[in-house]
Amino acid sequence: MTQSVYLVVLLLCFGLIHPFVTGIFMDKLASQKLCADDDCVYTISLARAEEDYNAPDCRFINIKKGQLIYVYSKLVKEKDSGEFWAGSVYGEQYEDHMGTVGYFPSGLVSEQHVYQEANKTVPTT
């Protein structure tokens, strides 16, 4: 009897700890991205948000209509996926968000100025 109780307790503990040990993995948005350089650190363009966007998880950034965004990379669209760019917000009024890089839907912004062509294809991690 005591062996079966220990076994049940052990299985319950493993079941409760398992999610913490394995972590939470999110699906990749794309396998490749377009950048201006091999490390995707140079700005490709400056875009203006045409609509508000609330980030669904930590990979994305919140953007507000009218906000300027530095674009660093553009994900290569794959079957059944949306088209996303990676960037960070720009401007003094968004000072607390400056430097935070994340994805946002490319259809919600318009490019205002292209600094350099995104002609390097880089694998995503």
Image: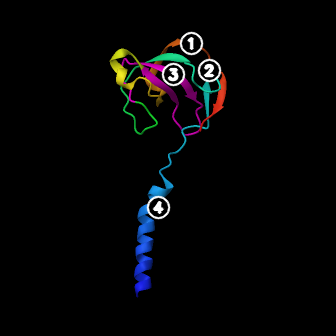
Apparent side of residue 56 relative to residue 70 in the rendered image (left or right): left
- Considering depth in this image, is 101 or 104 the residue closer to the camera? 101
Apparent side of residue 91 relative to residue 86 in the rendered image (left or right): left
- In this rendering, the answer to whether 99 lies above or below 111 is below
Q: CA distance from mark 1 to mark 2?
A: 9 Å
Which residue lies under the disc numbered 1? 115
**What segment is highlighted magenta in the picture?**
62-89
| Tags 3 and 2 touching, CB below 8 Å | no
Crowd band around label 1 with a 10 angstrom C-alpha radius: few (<14), some (14–19), many (20+): few
User: What is the three-letter code of the residue carrying label 3?
Assistant: Val
| Tags 2 and 4 touching, CB below 8 Å | no
Quadrant in which the N terminus is drawn: bottom left
The tag earlier along the polypeptide, 1 or 2, is 2
- Observer-side mark, 4 or 1, equals 4
Which residue lies under the disc numbered 4? 18
Q: CA distance from mark 3 to mark 2?
A: 10 Å
